[in-house]
């Protein structure tokens, strides 16, 4: 099941973009998944739900938009505005 490795990469991208200290404040991870991407969307969502429900994340949701084509990308990261300053 290569969806787990894709989910791990999405978590790595999230950490790279927001920083390790902000990971508990990530509320939603937006994805675009194309029908020709070679990824089974339901399996990817299952893997991400499992990874995002544990530390260092604090239960972030997955918002998946499906499209035609071969898209597979993180489209946005929603971070809680009430997080403490760095």
Image (spheres, helix red, strand yellow):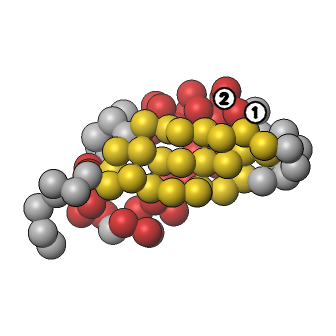
Give SS at disc 1.
loop
Q: How crowded is mark 1: few (under 14 residues within 10 Å), some or many (20 or more)?
A: some
Residue 23 lies in what quarter of the image?
bottom left
Does residue 50 lie above or below 26 as drawn?
A: above
Give SS at disc 2.
helix
Viewed as shown, does residue 80 lie left or right of 42? left
Res 8 visible? no
Looking at the image, which residue is at 28% across and 40% down?
Answer: 58
Q: Residue 18 carries which label?
A: none
Q: Nearer the viewer, residue 59 or 63?
A: 63
Which residue lies under the disc numbered 2? 43
Q: Do the residues labelled 2 and 1 touch (CB within 8 Å)?
A: yes
Does residue 36 lie above or below 84 as drawn?
A: above
Viewed as shown, does residue 17 lie left or right of 68? left
Res 26 visible? yes
Which residue lies under the disc numbered 1? 40
Q: How crowded is mark 2: few (under 14 residues within 10 Å), some or many (20 or more)?
A: some
Looking at the image, which residue is at 27% across and 60% down?
Answer: 22
Picture coordinates of residue 50 (x, y %)?
Answer: 46, 31
Residue at the farthest left position: 84
- How far apart marks 2 and 1 lie (CA) works out to 5 Å
Residue 3 lies in what quarter of the image?
top right
């Amino acid at each position: 099941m290569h969806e787990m490795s894709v989910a791990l990469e999405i978590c790595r991208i999230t950490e790279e973009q927001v920083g390790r200290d902000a990971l508990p404040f990530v509320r939603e991870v937006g994805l675009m998944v194309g029908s020709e991407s070679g990824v089974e969307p339901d399996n990817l969502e299952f893997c991400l739900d499992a990874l995002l429900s544990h530390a260092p994340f604090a239960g972030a949701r997955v918002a998946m938009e499906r499209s035609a084509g071969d898209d597979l990308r993180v489209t946005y990261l929603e971070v809680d505005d009430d997080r403490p300053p760095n």
